[in-house]
Image (cartoon, rainbow, N blue to C red):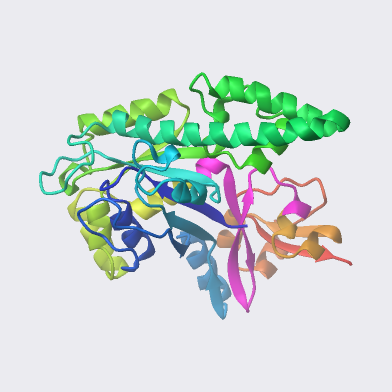
Amino acid sequence: MGLSIGIVGLPNVGKSTLFNALTKAQNAESANYPFCTIEPNKAIVPVPDIRIEQLARLVNPARLVNSTIEFFDIAGLVKGASKGEGLGNQFLSNIRETDAILHLVRCFENDDVVHVDGNINPIRDIEVIETELLLSDIQTLERKIEKLQKLAKGDKTAKQMLDDAESLLKYMNDGRSALMYPERDKESVKQLFNESRLMTAKQVIYCANVDETELVEDNEYVKAVKEYAGKNGADAVKISAKVEEEMIGLSDEERNEFLDSYGVKESGLEKIIKTGFHTLGLISYFTAGPKEVRAWTIHTGWKAPQAAGVIHTDFEKGFIRAEVISYDDYIKYGSEAACKSAGVMRIEGKEYTVQDGDIMHFLFNV
């Protein structure tokens, strides 16, 4: 399974610059005017994970395969987007395809970079975007209700979904997102969310974009964004899209030296991916052998058969058992054979909950 994140925000907050940096390629036009991105840009980026490199030193595989993350650079939204203003609904629909939203917010002053509303106010900017997403979701829900009203007369399942949709619509009409709906974990409501692809049901990561001189100390704008995120139960990260873009093409050593010069240890990509995994409750397990060392992304709490299913559905259907070595044990003993001899390789069944960093080998029969 892959993770997909849509980068949203007002025009001229740095989305395309960040996208260029995250994907290490100048494949999204950056320009100092609104709507320079006229098509959603998509890139598949390998997830940096030092554990793959450490395992590779021991296994010496033919290749390494990281987990991946899909980034979508979605054109700048403006007030009225839900009614077709700016570039309108075509870009709102692109957000529906993603797992999570990275809401990029401008938290720097620069007279040379115009702001669509004339001045810097990150909370106002956040509320503009979130209002447009909410209004668009309300329209989606109203259309869904119209269809369900026709189906509900002779269908109990449709009647239940209609009741849920009407209750959710009432909740959202009070200005509240679908993500905060008290009954969101109810199975019939989950189905409604899935069918409607509501944008406000997605997890949001707030990303404060700052000047390169403000990467260490938070300015007042960043503090406001972090406080807003905290009040809404969301994660927040701080990055400098300009610094990220300047690192394109640097070697690992040059990159680390460059980050050190700004007093930081992690790149914006690393922060965003770590936060994305945390926000969506994702972890990685590994398979390791002479052909490849590969990371596989799964949800926290998944059982062994589910984890096997991300490799191939047959692995889940015919699951027999799993051979499991913890990452720390594998590094300590240096090989699968040594782990067996030391008694740290475990045989686990269908009820085993996979842990982050497990090295696994599945036995199955179809």
Looking at the image, which residue is at 78% across and 58% down? 322
Q: Nearer the viewer, residue 1 or 308?
A: 1
Residue 32: quadrant of the picture: bottom left
- Magenta stretch: give its range: 277-306
- Is residue 294 inside the magenta stretch? yes
- Is residue 182 inside the magenta stretch? no
Q: Is residue 183 visible?
A: no
Q: Residue lying farthest left?
A: 111
Question: On the rendered structure, is 223 left or right of 262?
Answer: right
So how many labels did they put on this image? 0
Residue 220: quadrant of the picture: top left
Question: On the rendered structure, is 162 left or right of 197?
Answer: right
Residue 131: quadrant of the picture: top left
Looking at the image, which residue is at 11% across and 49% down? 112
The N terminus - image quarter? bottom right
Looking at the image, which residue is at 55% across and 34% down? 139
In percent of width and height, residue 18 lies at 32, 55
Q: Nearer the viewer, residue 118 or 50?
A: 118
The C terminus - image quarter? bottom right
Question: On the rendered structure, is 57 left or right of 108?
Answer: right
In percent of width and height, residue 23 lies at 38, 63
Q: Nearer the viewer, residue 91 or 227?
A: 91
Q: Is residue 15 visible?
A: yes
